[in-house]
Image: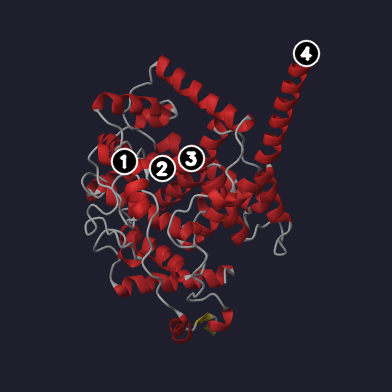
Amino acid sequence: MYASHILFTSICVAYVVLIRRLRFRRAAHHARLVADSSNLDNEEMPLPVAQEIYDSLMHAEFPFWIWKGIEMGLFRTYAIPTISAQLAKTSRLLPPKLPRRYVETQVLFLEFTLRKWGTVPWLQAMARTRAIHAGYRESGAVREEDMLYTLAALATTPVLLVEKLEWRSLSDVELAAIGTLYRAIADALEIDYSLYLASWTPGEQRTSIVGLDFYHALHRWQVRHEIRHMVYMPQNELLCEAAVDMLLWAIPGKPLKRFVTTALTSVMDDLLREAVGFPPTPFWIAHTTYAVLDIRKFCLRYLCPPRPDFLKIQWCDSDPSSIQCAFAVDKSFCRHGRPDKEFAGSCRTDPPRTGMTTYVAAPFFVKPTFRNRWLSPKAWWWWALRLPIPGDKPVVHKAGGYTIPDLGPRGLGCMDAAQEKEEAKVETVGLAKGWW
């Protein structure tokens, strides 16, 4: 009997040690990616490396809380009155338009964040995002602080949720990757962050902010901005209630949906919760929620092996790095420091329609397959609740997939001339920054 106890204890200890070694392999791999990069210069992480690390965090290491953090980051922007007032005025983030607008925002974000920089889809997505906001920015309806705050919320909120609720914290290498990527996104969108972040950055780094310093400066500025500007307004509550209702689309019954909504408020900070008009979370619900999350954290850290790379989440039905032809991926395409439109245009081949592989509410841009329509437990649940599944309304839900220029509200940068104008601006920024 004693020998069997010793054997059982030894097996348990060996298993925990093995899980720990496996669990931290991906973090070590991220560190090696940076160390092995031949382009590392003056502590500036290469952009492709930063993008690979961010993709790994989002779709392999922490897929649940990284994406929930991005959703929460968008949610935080609704608590800033200057942003929420403009969004409420357009009514595009209110029912019945919200599900499609959410998916289009998601698609544009994934395309310009994870697609290989310089490829046609990336350039189209970045230009489309710029075109949608161009009129508002030029008129002053959307301030540069609002653009920077949105960027900050998307960058930092996932990190904060991981730090609070996941089985490990992010390393400095991973934070530097996030800072490097979001700094490049800010440059591509021509958000003048230097003016706002100068006082939050160490003096020796003010002329060239490296990724880690940029992330910390961005977070410090965001906290100060929220203290000054995150206050309750009726439109804040209107937008947030609509967003929560959409995200909980598959929760049946008002009582259960109300309970889940209350549980979600337990992961909100008081400043955000008060700014969107949500009541304080009852103690027993908050205690139960965190108990469940702590159990999950313990099990993942000590008992569950990590997600293998072959089970990495794929957000679209094509390889994000598979489309190589770009407007200006090679400086030999340029004459007098500007892209050679004739040469690059002859190289350019518009990508085929891309299909999403997942959906939150209505299955927009999801190409129906036998698996996602008939074999998926999610489809069975949606069908039981009489919600649309892939293939139910192929015309309404654009089941053939999406093309990037068609994304977003009609009339905002949809003309070919507006799209080409923004693409040219992005190309110019890319050449100046040495992205291609």
Neighbor class of circle 1 (other Cα within 10 Å; few <14, some 14-19, many 20+) is: some
Task: Name the residue beneath numbered marker 1.
Answer: 380
From the viewer's perspective, tell me whether residue 230 is left or right of residue 197: left
Say which label, 1 or 2, has the lower sequence index. Answer: 2
Q: Residue at x 30, y 44 (%)?
A: 361
Count of marks placed on residues:
4
Amino acid on which the number 3 mark rests in the picture: Phe
Amino acid on which the number 2 mark rests in the picture: Glu
Say which label, 1 or 3, has the lower sequence index. Answer: 3
Neighbor class of circle 3 (other Cα within 10 Å; few <14, some 14-19, many 20+) is: some
Q: Nearer the viewer, mark 1 or mark 4?
A: 4
Say which label, 2 or 4, has the lower sequence index. Answer: 4
Which of the image's four quarters has the N terminus? top right
Above/below status of 188 relative to 238: below
Q: Residue at x 47, y 53 (%)?
A: 314
Q: x, y percentage for residue 324?
A: 52, 72
Question: What is the CA distance from the residue labelled 1 to the residue labelled 4?
Answer: 50 Å
What is the basis of the colouring in this image?
secondary structure
Q: Look at the image and tell me whether residue 200 can be seen.
A: no
Q: Nearer the viewer, mark 2 or mark 4?
A: 4
Q: x, y percentage for residue 435?
A: 57, 68
Numbered disc 2: secondary structure = helix
Neighbor class of circle 4 (other Cα within 10 Å; few <14, some 14-19, many 20+) is: few
Amino acid on which the number 4 mark rests in the picture: Tyr
* 110, 240: nearer the viewer: 110
Task: Name the residue beneath numbered marker 4.
Answer: 2
Q: Look at the image and tell me whether residue 426 can be seen.
A: yes
Question: What is the CA distance from the residue labelled 1 to the residue labelled 2?
Answer: 25 Å
